[in-house]
Amino acid sequence: MIRMGQRHLAVAWGLCLCLIALCLWVRLENYRFDASLLSLLPTAQQHDLGTQRAALANKHLTDLLDRELLLLVGAPDADTSAEWAARIQSAIASPTRQPQTVDATDVTQFSEAYFPHRYFLLAEQDRALLRDSPDQLLRRAQQQLYSPMGAGYQPIADSFWLFQNFLQSLAEQSPLSVQDGWPTLTHEGRVYRLVRFRLQGEAFDANAQAGLADLIDQLQAQLPTDVTFFSSGLVVHAAYGARMARQEISTVGLGSLIGVLALLWMSLGRGSVIALLSCVGAGLLLAMTVSVWWFESLHLITLAFGATLIGVGIDYGIHARVALASGERLRVLLPALLLGLVTSLLAYGIQGTMPFPGLQQMALFSCVGLLGAWLSACLWLPLLTDKGVHPRKIFQWVHHYWSRVPALPLKPQWVALLLIAALALFWQLPGDDRLSNLQTSPASLVAQEQTFQQLLQRGSKGQYFLVAADSEAELDARLMALNEQLAVLQGRGLISDFQSLHDWRPALERQWHNRALQESLYQTQGQSWFESLGAPALANDARQALVESAQPLTLARWSAQMPQPQFFFKSTEELFAIVPVQGVIDASSVQALSADNIHYVDRPATVAGLLSHYRLQLQHWTAVAIVLALSLLVWRLGWSALPLLAVPVLAAITVATVLSLWFSLTLFHCLALLLVLGIGFDSCIFLLAGAQPKPVWYATSLSVLTSGISFGLLALSETPVLHFFGLTVLMGLLLVWSAIPSVYKGLATDRVLVNRADYK
């Protein structure tokens, strides 16, 4: 009979959860979830000036470039490429994907923006000629005058073609030119048109991604054999990743859910399934509510990590349900349940002592969630009847396996030495923290992106120098010094190329020097030049135009009018220039150019370093948690219980070692190991502390099966993070389950009744 007080407690807990759900709903109304890498860094590192500046640059580049969708349509001739570019533009355009067009007016505006400052601007070749060989420059100007382009000659505004040469030098920095209203390039006899879209929102916004992946696939299928198009942009990769996730939810996810529900239904009955899922749901609800109220913003990776709660939380419920149905009272079962909870809280909670905000969030989320699931299991499961909780025939193989495996006697002292060696190995296992491990895009899409970047000669925006200054003159001086150093590295073949703000807007010092060179040219050669043209009277007009144009091109004017704003931005206190670097061969030589106000930013390396920090910290603190958990369990269950308690530890470290040596060990593998340890420790605790090993082994097998189905099937996922997690859980739980019977039978202690009648 269920005591009335226990029933009242269960109802009261349910009402508390309703209030908790209301608190969550109130908090989520204006809550902000975080996806910033900066927020994952240690607090001290977040306050580092270089890191803060890099975060500003990253936001600037993200706002400008990550909201672009670019398509390159290629065909054998100009007409076909223009036709298909228009079709594709029309098909993909939507309210959230606005097409960006280019026409002759844009080109004219570009020229007109530079025109008032033309006497301050020179192409590098013209600078060299004016400095070393003015006569050669005049001969070239005559050739230009009598060439087909001579029809556009402006004798007063651009007497020596210097401004036209400067504009041409800018155009040569890009392989694109405007033809037929499209940015166009020609490569190996094919004509390519660039189709640009600007997203009205974030790249990860569902509206921006809406139908994009399917639409691109459909358009690719409709293209004639001689027409191709390549896509680029964060939104494309996000759209394909979202589609893959949806597909896997409907296949792997739905399949695992059906499998787990069917397994629990057949083994524990319908009421138990509902109760177990309610326990897990209560844990997740409590974890989510406490976390969003405790932290101003919750990182998305914390929510992903919360998936481990499902496995450990339902593990408590299965053990409790089977034990209660076998006749054990909650009062007798409670010490084992409490011991399992404490060890899990140790494994997860010790992360909260680390200086990483992300791991602190995970620690709080996990510990609160486990506590909620555990409390729900203790209060709700005793209310269920014992009906339907009996091993089915399909599970007889579980007991056959137990009865047939030989005993494996192990000396606790030898096991202790083995554990020390294993933990020392785990402490220093190398990992693989490359960003490619997180790649969710199909290989075909990655190949398209690479071809796109090669055709447009675009380098990665992930590697650049960030130059900071308080004034324009200071910024120019630092940028000029950096450009000279990068030119040396380029000459030595250590980088392939770099782009600078000064390529588009020369430093003020350089501009005044350019003006001095042009003044000298007009003073010494102007009169004779116009006499050779038969218009000597124009010489004075040309010199007067030079005198009247006395304003250099400032950063403020350039950034307001020019189409290359990604090279420059400003905060409320500082000015910043971004210098992208391509083809880095020797990263150490490039990094050596960093100074107090010159920061080298390698975004892929930064993310990889962040993942490496987290993985190493997680390895180290997991090892510490294992030592503490084993110490507690040995103190509670006895020294002779160590061989069995070592099974989940050695299984987890074995999996980690295999992954590290033959595959790759990532942060997400390490997160999965916590789930293996949690379920493994629970199984050992209930076997050692329970009154009847047969139902405990049944519950252990059921727990491993459900976790294997729900998480192990993730190993089939094409999403690397999910694949890593699922593979680790599957391998680890299989080792734990297969090793427990032999080690349990080999225990020789008066506290562990291995000679019970049901498991002789």
Image (tube, grey):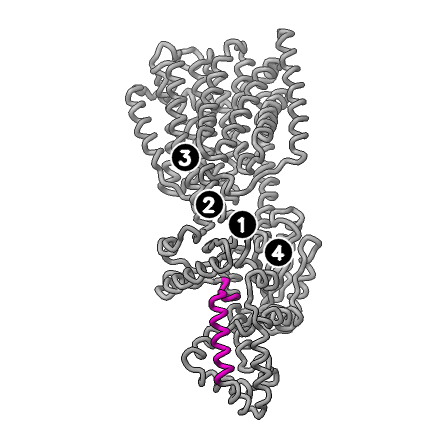
Estimate the x, y position of residue 751 in percent, counting from the top left: 38, 10
Secondary element under disc 3, as helix, strand or loop, is helix
Separation of marks 2 and 3 at Cα, in angstroms: 24 Å
Residue 221 in magenta stretch: no
Q: Nearer the viewer, mark 3 or mark 4?
A: 3
Per the image, the residue denoted by label 2 is 49
The numbered mark at residue 217 is 4
Separation of marks 1 and 3 at Cα, in angstroms: 36 Å
Per the image, the residue denoted by label 3 is 617
Visible in this render: residue 126? yes
Separation of marks 1 and 2 at Cα, in angstroms: 13 Å
Estimate the x, y position of residue 149 in percent, counting from the top left: 58, 83
Residue 516 in magenta stretch: yes
Q: Nearer the viewer, mark 1 or mark 2?
A: 1
Estimate the x, y position of residue 258 in percent, counting from the top left: 60, 32
What span is colored magenta in the figure? Answer: 501-524
